[in-house]
Amino acid sequence: MTLEQNDLDIIKNRLGREPNKVEEEFFVNLWSEHCAYRSSRPVLTNFVTDGDNVVIGPGDDAGVINLPNGEMLALAIESHNHPSYVDPYNGAATGVGGIVRDILSMGARPIALLDPLRFGDLDKEKNRYLLEGVVDGISDYGNSIGVPTVGGEVEFDSSYNGNPLVNAFCVGVVENLVTAKAKTPGNSLLLVGASTGRDGLGGASFASQELEEESEEERPSVQVGDPFTEKLLIDCILEMAEESLIEACRDLGAAGLGGASSEMCSLGGFGAEIDLNKVHLREEDMHPLEILLSESQERMLVEIDPENIDKARELVEKYDLESNVVGEVIKEEQYIAWHNDEKVVDLPVKLLTEEAPTYNRNEKEVDRSQEISSRTTPPVEESLTKIMANPNIASKEWIYSQYDYEVQTRTVVKPGADAAVLQMDEEGIALTSGCNSHHTYLNPFMGGKGSVLLNAMNLATMGAEPIAMVDCLNFGNPEREEIYWEFKETVKGMAEMADSMDIPVVGGNVSLYNESIEYGSTVKPTPNIGMVGWIPDIEQIPSMDVSTGDHVYLYGETRPELGASQYFKEIYNSVGENPPIPTDQDTENIKKVRQIVRENDIATARAISRGGLITALAKTAIKNNVGIKTDLTDVQGELDREEIFFSESYGRFLLISKKELEIEDNLLSHIGQIQNKKLEIQLVEDKSSWGPKELKKAYKSIEKLMKG
């Protein structure tokens, strides 16, 4: 990439001279969309980022919140989309490593990972290769560093052909809080961890490009991870923080040493002077620009009082890591870098880090609804079998079974449920991630609201109250008017729903230009969310133990909202017209279900979302190896068979209890009981049934496909 002429003119006018080649490339990276959020910064102001429990909001490596038990939790989410297309294994692995270091830089011990993923159609061999490589990268790295991967989401759609989305959400318990804000001029800047090489060069600018067929030749832009060094780095940084040696800390992520050092000192209102000859290298004859911008992994920059440098370096040596003092914080707000006694960078630090001009993009509303002129309804038995075999519905156990989700011994509810649960003494936190991009595609504003609502619904199934969220906003080229419109509308919807539910947005990531020239595709708007919920008593969560005779309840109202449903996509190959519309009642339903779960003997609870009510019933039967006999005649009302079965209306839950619930609520309907044979559903006009073998065969079909 090169600087646009307008950007170059701004820089020249501010400097009163031409930037040299090193400085110009520095601006290419720090003024990239990935670092400077030039298209998104004005839009992100819609989010409410503060609250009574917010300690640190957006702007640092991770957000930090106070938990009701007095502990602090750090949370962050990031994308590693383009690198994962070029090199799926290392792209995904280093995505995990990077988000873990973001948490670490706050003085927090990482305790859980979740991975919302998106891939193209699985009938293409390339997409299966990408999926396998990404899963291997996540599992190998996460398992090696001892951080459990406890949840996530996988969605498949042709819009992700040529541009998969690999997002990583991480949370950590703060042990000794530090920030990325430099404290004092004269303090040393200590580079800790792995040596610096040429891998990852230009990663920030690379992440701001569309993918072309030749992108696989861009391997120098993809970092290579070393999880064993990362594990040592985690322990080292946490001990340095415990010994009060760290004044400020930042992960070397986008734009490498240059990005970390300039941002750290700029946040503190200071500047930095860097000696690139002091950086420990693993390759010879590296150009100063390469040293400055390399995104080699497993490296952290820490601000240290000079009196503590010897002690800090001794501690680094204890963990068999390398470290060097590569510069210092200076009072003048200038960024200066030297190489071989030559000043290769001399720039106002704020110009680099804060003054990239934002874009006032044009936008154009698009009507994406599709009328289905002839709906020839197939037999419902056939429809459900098709839906259960769809990769978006089918079992993902073959993926999460590769992850070590029990390491650290906190995991109470494991992958496969709507939300993971981690124990925090007698209390707990619930974690969930993802969104429904089909909803957002058909109606970005309502889909944005629904993305927040869906995650809160998932938390409610564990009796958890949402207390904070982060978001990873994955969109196409914002220079296209319809893409910028869907981005703005999605964010507005998310912000409105989060604010109405009192969920602060404490951080996030924007990933734009997710398009593939090779496939001529643009990703559907994918606002993946990472959300944390609080459980005051870990003993209150559902037992997850379902047995014959248990009572089955439906909570919430099913509306004729088949637009953007998995059913319409599978059966009619259409997005339809009427998307699910989140309502105030839906948010109230979340509160009611959370209360029901906390106060009653609930065996299991499931949010009804992708695939509708019938899919939730089928998944429950398969997961627990039981049958379910249900009668929906009282709740069907004016709905036709397709609507009652496959509508994806928000605010609905499937609840199973050992005893009949003595609750007076007109939205709670007793619809059946657990039995030891088929799934049977009685409607007003007919009865349908499915045997366990045929449902399970369809549900496990993706495993057969991936295992060849």
Image (spheres, grey):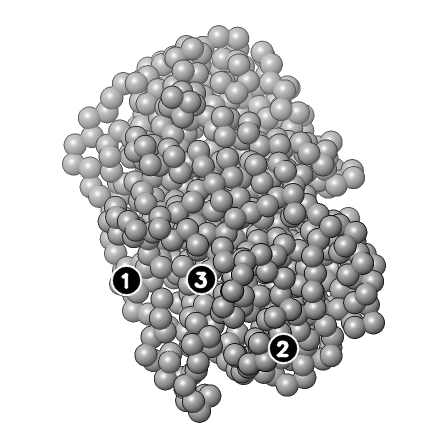
Look at the image and tell me whether residue 266 can be seen. no
Task: Work out which quarter of the rendered image holds the C terminus and state it.
Answer: top left
Q: In the orientation shown, which residue stands out farthest toward the left? A: 373
Pick the quarter of the image with the N terminus. bottom left
528 or 326, nearer to the observer: 326
Q: Relative to 241, is 580 above or below?
A: above
Residue 204 pos. (x, y %): 46, 61
Q: Quadrant of residue 380?
A: top left
* Disc number placed over residue 480 in the picture, else none: 1
Q: Are marks 3 and 1 in contact (CB under 8 Å)?
A: no
Question: What residue do we see at 40% from left, 15% from top?
Answer: 697
The three-letter code of the residue at mark 3 reads Gly
- The image shows residue 12, relative to residue 504, as above or below, that is below
Marks 2 and 1 sit apart, C-alpha to C-alpha, by: 38 Å
The residue tagged with tag 3: helix, strand or loop? loop
Can you say whether 513 is above or below 257 in the image? above
Mark earlier in primary sequence (3, 1): 3
Q: Secondary structure at mark 1?
A: loop
Label 2 vs 1, first from the N-terminus: 2
- Which residue: 79% across, 67% down? 309
Separation (CA) of disc 3 from disc 1: 24 Å
Q: Amino acid at mark 2?
A: Ala
487 or 246, nearer to the observer: 246
Which residue has dot 3 on it?
202
**Residue 27, label in figure:** none
Tell me the residue that label 2 is attached to.
Answer: 272
| Residue at far bottom of view | 16
Left or right side of 49 for 135? left
The answer to which image quadrant residue 381 occupies is: top left
Mark in the foreground, 2 or 1: 2
Residue 643 x %, y %:
33, 31
